[in-house]
Amino acid sequence: MSGPSNPSIPYDVPTSARGYGWMLGGKDNYEIDRKFILSTVPSFPEVVDICRQNRQFLYRAVRYLTRERGIRQFIDMGCGLPTDNNVHQVAQRFAPDARVVYVDIDPIVLAHGRALLADDSSTTVIMGDMRDQDAILNHPDLVRLIDFDEPVATLFLSVGHHLVDADDPRRVLRTIIDRAAPGSFVGFSQVICEDPVRGARMTEHIAGGGVPWQTRTPAEVDVLLEGLEPVEPGVVNLVDWRPDPDQPALEPVDPDLVPYLGVTEANKGIYEYGGVLRKP
């Protein structure tokens, strides 16, 4: 894509939605997004694998929640650009009556999402900042589709690292958790680094490029999720969360990213950490 015609769409800085979408094989991105990813992978080549591993986890988590836990309503915070096997497609494959609300701060996500969902009354996309949970939870489109008297699954997938400590991420999570009925679920994942020094370098690089970011350790993520009951196998490297070699494949990556595929098989220090957790 070249520069956007809509002036509200930022194209002078990279965005997480567009960069993430490019690593999933998507085409809805700008040169600045691609340059930023290509500036990141020499030092942190794991990001391509873990982006794709998170997307595969989304499929398994939503399938589990619909098929095994009977969840029929989902809120996807920081949903990113539409691609294959989006939350509503996975959920409605196993539960045709499932309802989904997508939330993202990037205007291009809103534009593409609304076009995709124009004829789907059970799914909507709203523009919102996940740090402002009250505004999201009171949005009329969310109120129309989500019944908080019934269990709901809220997904914060590969967005935990965009909530820096100054945002009080535990408050962000607790706002929706406190509203949700008992028996509701949270899907959560974020990039972690077991080496705090390297993690700090990763934070400096990505945040310095204009994308809000905080790499954490597993222990720091565990603190955010206290009070919730992890579903087996717990909060883990996402490749270890109920792996399924027969799940649908992802789109191939751009040739520029092919050299970085498979890096996490040898490099274990940076990975996507998360799971599905139940509200008691």
Image: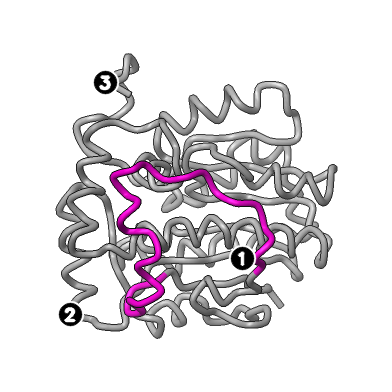
Between 112 and 244, the residue placed more toward the observer is: 244
- 202 in the magenta segment: no
Give the quadrant of the C terminus: bottom right
Q: CA distance from mark 3 to mark 2?
A: 37 Å
Label count reads 3
Q: Position of residue 17 (x, y in %)?
A: 40, 43
Which residue is depicted at the point 25% across and 83% down?
195
Q: CA distance from mark 1 to mark 3?
A: 36 Å
Proximity of marks 1 and 2: CB atoms separated by less than 8 Å: no
Q: Give the quadrant of residue 28.
A: top left
Say which mark, if any, is on residue 197: 2
Say which mark, if any, is on residue 3: 3
- 248 in the magenta segment: yes
Q: Position of residue 34 (x, y in %)?
A: 26, 40
Say which mark, if any, is on residue 186: 1
At label 3, the amino acid type is Gly
Secondary structure at badge 3 equals loop
